[in-house]
Image (cartoon, rainbow, N blue to C red):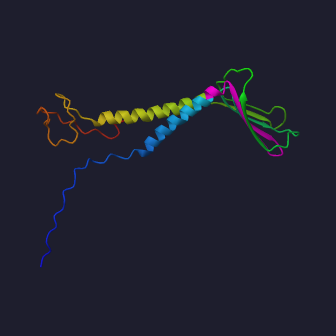
Amino acid sequence: MPRPRRHRRPRPHRRPRRPRRRGRRIAKWSLLALSVLLFAAWLVSGWFVGIVAYYDGECRHDIHLHCGGLHYLRFNRAGFSPTHFYCTFGRVATPHPWWWTPTAQGPWGGPYSKHVFLPLIWPCVAASALAGLFFWRDRSSQLLSKTPCPACGYDLAGTPGPRCPECGAETPTPAPSEPSARL
């Protein structure tokens, strides 16, 4: 005896899936947050100084947030305090000008003393440019995916025929573009 057929409920119409862009979304918002934090640190470093120091027994390593950037100083001298780690933050008595170019100096004051400076404005500009590029690419791909009717402006994405369902105008079918030509 044949089985009776079960009637299935019709499934609601689903829109076609978009390609996953979660990684790009996370990257663009992370880069934007990083650029804002770097800009804030660059701005604050003109009036305040933050110091993190570590003494490992042979030399002292200092990282300063000051004059618009990060300073790394390594002193190879004996006679430092026995404190192994300290951190401080305070206001500068006289504001110093911002440094704009990276520098590396050494040796000075001893055979292994070093001073390296990285201005924070350049990583901030690079992160902002990359975030802007990601935002621009997403916006331009959204604009390219829309296909309006030339007569009335109705969105023709997903319509089966060459006629506009809104006004009935004949629409030219665009030639398929190559994937490398799209942004």
Image quadrant where residue 81 sits: top right
Please give left or right for residue 38 compared with residue 134 in the image: right
Q: Is residue 27 left or right of residue 71?
A: left
Looking at the picture, tell me which residue is in the foreground, 59 or 181.
59
Q: Residue at x 22, y 37 (%)?
A: 175
Observer-nearest residue: 154 or 176? 154
Snapshot quadrant of residue 73 = top right
**Which region shows up in magenta?**
42-63
Q: Position of residue 178 (x, y in %)?
A: 30, 40
Which residue occupies 52% across, 36% down? 33
* The stretch drawn in magenta includes residue 60: yes
Q: Is residue 104 above or below residue 14?
A: above
The front one of 87 and 156 is: 87
Image quadrant in which the C terminus is located? top left
Residue 163: % across, % down: 13, 36
Relative to 19, say whether 65 is above or below. Answer: above
Task: Work out which residue is located at the far right of the displayed protein and give it.
Answer: 79
Verify whether residue 56 appears in magenta.
Answer: yes
How many marks on residues? Answer: 0
Q: Quadrant of the N terminus?
A: bottom left
- Residue visible at 17% across and 28% down? 152
- Residue positioned most to the bottom: 1
**How far across and down, in percent of the image, does residue 149 sit?**
19, 31
Image coordinates of residue 127 in percent, x first then y, are 53, 33
